[in-house]
Each structure stands twice: as structure tokens, then as C-alpha cells.
């Protein structure tokens, strides 16, 4: 595309939805029936079309060249564009494709002279809404315009509705424009209103809890509690009494009776986080509640009826756990009615700049700092890094940078070494020192092993396990690298 066209495109993408005020040559003060742009080089045709349409209550803007027409489109929205195929400066087809590029939904009616039906067919294939042959029949032209305006308005309403839904749906705090995240947003909006159990799968820090909350907030249960339970950080015995409650005397420390979280979440949502860490015993009890919607307090005899929506989350492969006999197959299928896979951040790098902006804003406000900006040099390594801790790791990185920053620009100096690639650099092979490649590699290996042994309190068995190598392999390396084993202590990382 030419330079001019490109700037027009940029202009087009910035246009704001039009109010229906009178524009161009229209004198009408009544509400406009729609906004029409006529692009035709023949003044006579422009004038007769303009008069015809104005008499029907349309607001009309006219342009004599393709370039002029595109400039109008860049400034404001039109319901329909009437576009002549033969223009002096640009082919009508080119104008059409430039409009399509930035406004795929814009209604465009092509106007062709006699004998150019083939062109008209091509125009339709390129996405024109319709075409009209000169000389036209007024009634037919008006009917076509009316239909196109109606379609355009419906389209616009649909977009407005979606925008309103997004706001109502509380998605503002969830950032993402990548294809996989847009799919997730759609799915959230679709599944939220139902009572179906949802299984969220994804690496740590990908936003499982955030999405679980969004599902709850967009359901009819939004005014009832959202109750998170972390199966991983709660000891198994405590987990059952936490979930199901207990009667007085159910176990030694049960000095009084207590409600379980299933009751607390009644008519709301229970978020079972890290479900893969749940014991087989607890799994079967959960399965029973899912099947019967009933349960009993620990030590109790009375059945309690609840209406709880379950959202479960896992960062391990539950299917694999089922294969290995570590997760109940029947529970897996009960939970897996609808599953959402949250992609790791490294698979949707286009979301990184957006998330960086979001967290800069959040932490500048939270720390009562003036707004912070990221420099282009600093954004580059952030987009390139692999983010094993996903969005949480990115969030922590930005929070740290904002707290450490002293002026409005956040540069590479405020980013951790391992992200920028400082400090992790491989030692250079300097010929003057006489070091060889193998010598440097041995040195690195020695340092890595000593570092791990120190972390494990010089327990070789534990170090071998953490390296995922047999103990004999580690011992051979220790001997070969002449690592002096220090006495064991009980230190653990
Ligand atoms: N798309 C997103 N937009 C904005 N913030 C996000 C997004 N995804 C995650 N976050 C933020 O990242 C942090 C981690 O998200 P969350 O706790 O939901 O992840 P998780 O998948 O539950 O992680 P874990 O498995 O470690 O529990 C939260 O502070 C959350 O607000
Ligand atoms: Mg979580």
C-alpha cells in the first residue's frame, strides 16, 4: 500500500462512532435516516444521488475522488458508502479493498456504468455489499440503501451489545487480545450462566483463579459467595473438615460443631484449586456431593442438601494422573464437563505489552506514584523472556520495577538480570588465560553441582534426585571434578 493510503488507514482506525448530526450538504434537522458517503467523479451523478437520498432523510457527504472519500471515512463512520468503480485517481476496487482492510463490516454499494458487469461481479467477490448499474432505478437504489443501512445498524448494535456485555461481565481486570485469550473470554461468557462444572487447566500463574472468579461474577450466583479452597496447601484431614464441616466431638479437637465450605458456598461457587493434590478418599467424597448434591458433616448422621457450582483448577495433567491411578476416573469425567485450557504466557507473547501496561498502571496507583512508562529497550526482553511463572511472574517483575523506579521511565536497569540476560552469561573463552572450552565447561559443572549440594545440605541422595540423575552418576562427577564433600547438616532450602 502507498504511503498516503497507509496514513489514511491509520486515520480510519482512529475514527470514532458517528453521532447522527447533520454533515456535509444536508440541511435536515430531523434525526438522520443514516449516513451515506457518495464517491463519484461525475458532479451530475453526485448531485442527483445526493438530492434523492436527502429527500429520504439521509445525511449525505460527497467526494469526487477515491482519496477524498477515504479521508472522509477516516474521520467518521458511515452506514453506507456508494462507490463508483471508475474514479480518476484510484480504481474503485482499490478503494474498496482499502476500506475493507480496516472496516471489514462497512457496507459498500458499487456503482458501475453499462457494460462493466464483469467488474461488478469482481466487486461482489471482493466484498462489496451490492452493486447498482447506471442509469439506476431510483426505487431499487433506495431499497438497496435502506437494506444496507438496516444491516449496518444491526451490526453496530451487536458490537455495542458485546462492548456492554464485556463491561457488565467484569472482564476489565482481565487483559488479553491474543486469539487464545479471546476464545477464553467467549467461552467464559458462554459457560458462566449455566450451572455446569468447569475444569480450568494451565500452568501456574496463567490466571486460573482470575478466570474462575470471572465465571462466578458473570453467573446468576454473583451475589452469593465465591469460596476458594486450596487442596494443595491444606493438610488432608483438615481439608475434609474444612469442606464438609464437622459435628462436636467428631474428632479430638472438634470441641464445637462447624459448618463446611460446601454450606458456605450454598447457591454460590466453590473453587477447588489444585484438585490434583487431593487424596483419593477426599476425591470420592467430592464425587458424592457432585452426584447427589448432598453430604454429611464429619461425624454427623444428617444429610445436608446444597446447591453449589464447582469450578476446579489444576496445573498438573489430570488425565495422566487418571492413567497412573492417582486420580479417580469418574471424578475426572464429572469435573471435565467443560474444560478451559489457559495457555502459558510464552504462547501468547502479543499479550505481554498489554499486561505490562496494565500492571504499570496498577502498581503506579497502588504505590501512589505518578504514571510509569516502559522504555522500548526494556519492553524487548520482557516480550522475549520465557516466563516460566507466567502472568504472576510478569506481574511481580513490574511491581518490583515500579517500586524501585525513581522517575517516570522504566528501563532495563530495573529488570532482573535473568530476564535481561545479564549475569547468566556463559564465561567467555579468553585465549590469554589459556582456558580451554572443556576447562570452562568443567568449571561450570563444578559450580552447578556445589550449588545444588549446598541447597540440599550436602545430602548427595537428595541432590541426585533434584538433578534427576542416578546417585552413582552424581558420585562419579563429584570424584572426577574433585569436589570436596562437606559434612552433612540438616539445612534445607
Ligand atoms: N489475563 C490476565 N490479566 C490480568 N492479570 C492477570 C491475567 N492472568 C493472570 N493475572 C494475574 O496474575 C496473577 C496470577 O493469576 P492467578 O492466581 O489467577 O493464576 P493461577 O493460574 O491460579 O496460578 P496458580 O496455579 O499458581 O495458583 C494474579 O495476580 C492475576 O490477577
Ligand atoms: Mg491459583
Image: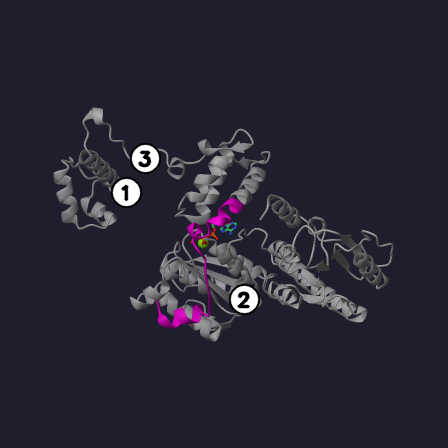
Q: Position of residue 434 (x, y in %)?
A: 18, 27
Distance from label 3 to label 1 (Cα)? 28 Å
Q: Which residue corresponds to mark 1?
A: 492
Q: Is mark 2 within 8 Å of ligand 1?
A: no
**Mark 2 or mark 3: whose residue is earlier in sequence:** 2
Quadrant of the rendered image containing residue 442: top left
Element assignment for label 3: loop
Residue at (86, 58) in percent of width and height: 30
Residue at (54, 32) in percent of width and height: 409
Please indicate whether residue 127 sits to the left or right of residue 480 in the image. right
Q: Which residue corresponds to mark 3?
A: 425
Element assignment for label 2: helix
Q: Position of residue 69 (x, y in %)?
A: 71, 52
Disc nearest the viewer among 2 and 1: 2
Distance from label 2 to label 1 (Cα)? 45 Å
Distance from label 2 to label 3 (Cα)? 47 Å
Please indicate whether residue 8 sits to the left or right of residue 387 in the image. right
From what the image shows, is residue 110 above or below residue 357?
below
From what the image shows, is residue 204 above or below residue 432?
below
Identify the image quadrant of the C terminus: top left
Residue 184 on the magenta span: no
**Crowding near the residue tagged with mark 3, few <14, some 14–19, many ≥20 C-alpha atoms within 10 Å:** few
Q: Which residue corresponds to mark 2?
A: 191
Amino acid at each position: 500500500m502507498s504511503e498516503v493510503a497507509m496514513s489514511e488507514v491509520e486515520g480510519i482506525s482512529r475514527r470514532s462512532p458517528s453521532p447522527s448530526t447533520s454533515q456535509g450538504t444536508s440541511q435536515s434537522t430531523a434525526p438522520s435516516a443514516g449516513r451515506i458517503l457518495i464517491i463519484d467523479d461525475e458532479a451530475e451523478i453526485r448531485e442527483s444521488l445526493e438530492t434523492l437520498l436527502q429527500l429520504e432523510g439521509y445525511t449525505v457527504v460527497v467526494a469526487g475522488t477515491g482519496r477524498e472519500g477515504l479521508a472522509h471515512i477516516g474521520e467518521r463512520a458511515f452506514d453506507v458508502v456508494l462507490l463508483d468503480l471508475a474514479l480518476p485517481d484510484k480504481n474503485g476496487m482499490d478503494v474498496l479493498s482499502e476500506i475493507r482492510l480496516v472496516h471489514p463490516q462497512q457496507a459498500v454499494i458499487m456503482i458501475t456504468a453499462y457494460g462493466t458487469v464483469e467488474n461488478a461481479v469482481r466487486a461482489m467477490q471482493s466484498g462489496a455489499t451490492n452493486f447498482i448499474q447506471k442509469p439506476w432505478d431510483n426505487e431499487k437504489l433506495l431499497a438497496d440503501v435502506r437494506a444496507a443501512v438496516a444491516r449496518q445498524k444491526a451490526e453496530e448494535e451487536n458490537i455495542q451489545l458485546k462492548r456492554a456485555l464485556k463491561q457488565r461481565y467484569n472482564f476489565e481486570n482481565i487483559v488479553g487480545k491474543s486469539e487464545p485469550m479471546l476464545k477464553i473470554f467467549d467461552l467464559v461468557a458462554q459457560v458462566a450462566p449455566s450451572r455446569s462444572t468447569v475444569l480450568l487447566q494451565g500452568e501456574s500463574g496463567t490466571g486460573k483463579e482470575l478466570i474462575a472468579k470471572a465465571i462466578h461474577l458473570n453467573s446468576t450466583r454473583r451475589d452469593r459467595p465465591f469460596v476458594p479452597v486450596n487442596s494443595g496447601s491444606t493438610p488432608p484431614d483438615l481439608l475434609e473438615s474444612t469442606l464438609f464441616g464437622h459435628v462436636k466431638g467428631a474428632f479430638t479437637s472438634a470441641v464445637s460443631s462447624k459448618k463446611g465450605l460446601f454450606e458456605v458456598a450454598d447457591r454460590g461457587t466453590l473453587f477447588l484449586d489444585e484438585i490434583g493434590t487431593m487424596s483419593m478418599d477426599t476425591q470420592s467424597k467430592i464425587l458424592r456431593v457432585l452426584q447427589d448434591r448432598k453430604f454429611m458433616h464429619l461425624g454427623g448422621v444428617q444429610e445436608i442438601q446444597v446447591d453449589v457450582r464447582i469450578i476446579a483448577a489444576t496445573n498438573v495433567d489430570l488425565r495422566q494422573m487418571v492413567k497412573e491411578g492417582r486420580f479417580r476416573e469418574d471424578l475426572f469425567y464429572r469435573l471435565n464437563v467443560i474444560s478451559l485450557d489457559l495457555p502459558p504466557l510464552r504462547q501468547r507473547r502479543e499479550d505481554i505489552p498489554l499486561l505490562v501496561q496494565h500492571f504499570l498502571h496498577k502498581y503506579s496507583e497502588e504505590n501512589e506514584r505518578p504514571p510509569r512508562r516502559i522504555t522500548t529497550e526494556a519492553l524487548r526482553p520482557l516480550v522475549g523472556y520465557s516466563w516460566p511463572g507466567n502472568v504472576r511472574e510478569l506481574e511481580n517483575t513490574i511491581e518490583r520495577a515500579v517500586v524501585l523506579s525513581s522517575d517516570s521511565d522504566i528501563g532495563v536497569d530495573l529488570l532482573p538480570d535473568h530476564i535481561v540476560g545479564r549475569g547468566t552469561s556463559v564465561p567467555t573463552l579468553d585465549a590469554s588465560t589459556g582456558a580451554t572450552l572443556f576447562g570452562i565447561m568443567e568449571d561450570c559443572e563444578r559450580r552447578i553441582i556445589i550449588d545444588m549440594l549446598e541447597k540440599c545440605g550436602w545430602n548427595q541422595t537428595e541432590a541426585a534426585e533434584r538433578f534427576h540423575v542416578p546417585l552413582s552418576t552424581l558420585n562419579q562427577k563429584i570424584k572426577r571434578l574433585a569436589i570436596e564433600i562437606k559434612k552433612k547438616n540438616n539445612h534445607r532450602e
